Image: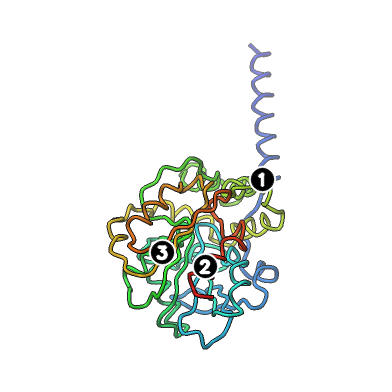
Amino acid sequence: MKLLLKSLALLVGGLLFFAAVGIWATWAPDKPVDALKLRWAQAPSQFINVQGMQVHLRDEGPRDDATPLVLLHGTSASLHTWQGWAGALKGQRRVIRFDLPGFALTGPHPQDDYSIAAYVRFVVAVMDQLGVQRFVLAGNSLGGQIAWEVAHAHPQRVAQLVLVDAAGYVFEPKSVPIGFQIARSPLLQPLMRNTLPRGLVERSVRNVYGDAAKVTPDLVDLYYDMTQRAGNRRALGLRMQQIVPRAPERIATLKVPTLILWGGQDRLIAPENAQKFAKDIAGSKLVVFDALGHVPHEEDPAATVAPVKAFLGL
C-alpha cells in the first residue's frame, strides 16, 4: 500500500510539474495597447474617440472622393488584414479601415456590447465622426455581416457593397479555428486569459487559409499580439456568447449594388453560402477563388482586389 501511495504521489507530482512548466512556457498576460502601438500603429495609423473608445484607424487616399471605401475585418482580425487592398486602391480612392470593438488595438467595448446591432451603430458613428455621409462598404466574415446589416439599416448611406466570405446565414463549419473553439468554452476561457501558446495562434490562422504555406511568422506575430491586447481575450469570449441568429430574410431586401467574393477552400463558412447571397441579392455578382480560404483578401490581395477595381470602375 505504501508503495502504491508513493507511486501515486510521484505521478501527481509529475503531472503538476509538467502542468506548471506548460503554463510557464505559454504564459502571456494581457499587454497594454501602448506597448503594441510601436510596431502595429505606425503612420498612417491614428486613434479617434468614438463611443468612449480610442479607435485605431487608417484613412488614406484622396479626400475629394465622394464615396470612400470602408473596410471591415472579421473576428479576431484587424485593419491590417486589408493592407494589400488599401495599397492597391488608395491611389485612386479614399480607403478607410479600422479595428472593430473587441479586437486588435481598439480593444473592448465599454459596455461589453458585441451584438450586431452595436457594431452597426459603431460603424455609423465612425463615419459620422469622419464626416462621411455616403460610402462603399466591404467586409469579411463578421465584418461582412456588419456590412450588409449597415446597408439594410441605412440604405441611403451605402452606395455599394462588397461581401467577402460574409456571415449571415446559418452555416455548418467543416473546421473551426482552435482559438474560436477555446473562446466558446466557459471552462477554458479563464485559462486562456493569461496563457497563449503561439502555436495555437498559428494553427488558427493556418486553418482559415487555403494554402497554409502562405502564413508567415510576421503574420502570426500580428495575430498573436492583437490577441494579447488588454481585454481582447475576454471580449472574444463575450462576443461568442452574444452570437444570436439573425433573420437572413432581410438580405433579400437589399437593393444596393453588391459584389460577392468567396474562397473556394473556406472551411468555416462554406462556398454554398456565397450562392445563397448571390441568389437573394438581386443583380449581385459572385466571384469564387477556388484555391483561397476564409480570408481571401489577405491570402491573395492582388487576385481578389482585381474584381473590386472593376466593380468600382477603376
Q: Are marks 3 and 2 in contact (CB under 8 Å)?
A: no
Residue 165: % across, % down? 47, 55
Q: Amino acid at mark 3?
A: Ile
Of callouts 3 and 2, the N-terminal one = 3
Q: Which residue is mark 3?
A: 146
Nearest-to-viewer mark from 1 and 3: 3
Residue 279: % across, % down? 34, 55
Q: Residue furthest top?
A: 1
> At numbered mark 3, what does the secondary structure look like: helix, strand or loop?
helix
> At numbered mark 1, what does the secondary structure look like: helix, strand or loop?
helix
Nearest-to-viewer mark from 3 and 2: 2
> At numbered mark 2, what does the secondary structure look like: helix, strand or loop?
helix
Q: Amino acid at mark 1?
A: Gly
Residue 199's label in the rendered image is 1
Spatial CA distance of label 1 from label 3 is: 30 Å
Number of residues whose C-alpha sits closer than 10 Å to that of mark 1, classed few (under 14), some (14–19) or many (20 or more):
few
Residue 96: % across, % down? 53, 75
Q: Which residue is mark 2?
A: 308
Nearest-to-viewer mark from 1 and 2: 2
